[in-house]
Amino acid sequence: MKKKLIALLMCFSLVIAAGCGASDTNSSDSESSESAQSTSANDSGSNKLITIGFSQVGAESDWRVANTASMKSALSEKNGFKLIFADAQQKQENQIKAVRDFISQDVDVIAIAPVTETGWETVLGEAKDADIPVIIVDRMIKVSDDSLFSCWVGSDFQKEGVNAAEWLVNYMKEKGKTDKQNVVVLQGTIGSSAEIGRTKGFGDTIKKYDNFNILAQQTGEFTQAKGQEVMESFLKQYNDIDVVIAQNDNMAFGAIDALKAAGKAPGKDVTIVSFDAVKAAFKSMIAGDMNVSVECNPLHGPRVAELAKKLMNDEKVEKIQYVDEKVYPAEIAEKELPNRQY
């Protein structure tokens, strides 16, 4: 990296200066130590913190809050980082502004949890021109040039959708339900990689089975309030809903509230399939309101910290970094709840 070359030349100059004044070794060491601790993001030293700018989508869900907490914990000063955090409030224009601010502050690494997949070419090109590596977190992006970002950390959203569909098919078989099952889908933010992957994975798998019929699908924007609003609309349009697919737990909670208000028993009259597997979802399953939650692991912080350090050392990293995930049905919720970190 250009920054590292400049830093190494500066360090080399300091070594020569120290050699010329050998009798002043203790004084020089002390000054060097103090300098390393107070270096800006543009300097280098053995005690230098890695400055990382992180643009987060927002705080729209319990999952997102857990994701933010993981990033802040892993990218702490005690772990060798100086974190500059920016909440985009679910607006891409806020993220683009934040990234440009990070560039102007000359951070070492930029991490982005993108609102949507597209619209990143220009600002990532600016980061590349500034020689700042970019780590994409959670949702994937679509760019014409993959060199615009160093790596991506997150979930296999399409596999999550497949897992949800396969669980539903097996669940109905176990219950002996061979009649037509009418399904409504609460989608996440349209255009986000989580929405795209889960919609495709579930849709492509479930259409292989004749006894499932998707009545409607509409975005609930990954929020509980919007999820409830959309579910209320579905209930007014259809009186024969058998299954709700909610692309995150918060929308599922909203759907559950809407079903209860309509006099239906979620988890019994209507099968509830959700994604994320946050603690509150386990409590909902224990209460009998939710049938399953497909895990989407938000604890990305440690992996991002590891990758940032490797990038600063010019080490090669894998472009795609999937996190480990499971499927949690209601039967094991009570046993698993004490083990949940989020």
Image (spheres, rainbow, N blue to C red):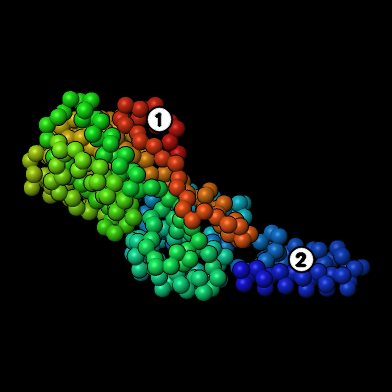
| Disc nearest the viewer among 2 and 1 | 1
User: Which of the 4 image quarters holds residue 288?
Assistant: top left
Residue 141, horizontal then vertical, whole percent: 38, 61
Above or below for 184 versus 176: below
Secondary element under disc 2, as helix, strand or loop, is helix
Quadrant showing the C terminus: top left
**Residue sitting at 32 percent across and 57 percent down?**
192
Q: Is residue 294 visible?
A: yes
Mark 1 residue crowding within 10 angstroms, few (<14) / some (14–19) / many (20+): few
Give left or right: position of 287 versus 10. Answer: left
Mark 2 residue crowding within 10 angstroms, few (<14) / some (14–19) / many (20+): some
Residue 177, horizontal then vertical, whole percent: 16, 28
Residue 114, horizontal then vertical, whole percent: 39, 60
Residue 154, horizontal then vertical, whole percent: 43, 50
**Residue sitting at 29 percent across and 46 percent down?**
201
Give left or right: position of 45 versus 307. Answer: right
Q: Nearer the viewer, residue 217 or 27?
A: 217
**Residue sitting at 23 percent across and 37 percent down?**
272
Instruction: Please identify the residue farthest to the right as the structure is shown.
Output: 23
Instruction: Please state which amino acid type lies under the numbered disc 2.
Output: Ser
Numbered circle sitting on residue 57:
none
Q: Look at mark 1 in the image and give the residue it sits on.
A: 336
**What is the number of callouts on the image?**
2
N-terminal label among 2 and 1 = 2
Secondary element under disc 1, as helix, strand or loop, is helix
Q: CA distance from mark 2 to mark 1?
A: 51 Å
Q: Look at mark 2 in the image and give the residue it sits on.
A: 32
Q: Is residue 257 visible?
A: no
Instruction: Please state which amino acid type lies under the numbered disc 1.
Output: Glu
